[in-house]
Image: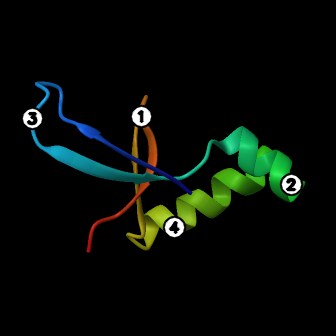
Amino acid sequence: MRRCTGRDRRGRRPYRVRGLISEVKLEQEFGVARETVRKATAALREEGLIVTTRGMGSFVAER
């Protein structure tokens, strides 16, 4: 999981983002096929544990 601190688009208020590493990096780190990574992230998404935003990546869902 990667973490970064930054500011919103207008440069206001710091925010904290907790995102998952890319599918490619997960695939390489665990030595599994990309389809396996996609199935795993889909299961986490269905359980509401992560949120995926197109073009941004997957992030830990807020509780």
Question: Residue under circle 3?
Answer: 12
Q: Secondary structure at mark 3?
A: loop
Judged by depth in the image, the label closer to the viewer, 1 or 3, is: 3
Disc 3 marks a residue whose amino acid type is Arg
The N terminus lies in quadrant:
bottom right
Image point (67%, 43%), residue name: 23
Q: Nearer the viewer, residue 42 or 8?
A: 8
Q: Position of residue 37 (x, y in %)?
A: 71, 54
Q: Is residue 43 above or below residue 23?
A: below
Give the left or right position of residue 48, taking residue 6 as reference.
Answer: right
Between the C-alphas of marks 1 and 3, the distance is: 20 Å
Disc 1 marks a residue whose amino acid type is Met
Q: Position of residue 43 (x, y in %)?
A: 55, 67
Q: Position of residue 42 (x, y in %)?
A: 55, 59
Q: Secondary structure at mark 1?
A: loop
Q: Nearer the viewer, residue 51 or 35?
A: 51
Disc 4 marks a residue whose amino acid type is Leu
Question: Residue under circle 4?
Answer: 44
Question: Residue under circle 1?
Answer: 56
Task: Determine whether label 4 and label 2 are within 8 Å by CB.
Answer: no
Judged by depth in the image, the label closer to the viewer, 2 or 1, is: 1
Give the left or right position of residue 33, taking residue 8 as reference.
Answer: right
Disc 2 marks a residue whose amino acid type is Val
Image point (21%, 36%), residue name: 7
Residue positioned most to the right: 31
The answer to which of marks 1 and 3 sits earlier in the sequence is 3
Q: Secondary structure at mark 2?
A: loop
Q: Secondary structure at mark 4?
A: helix
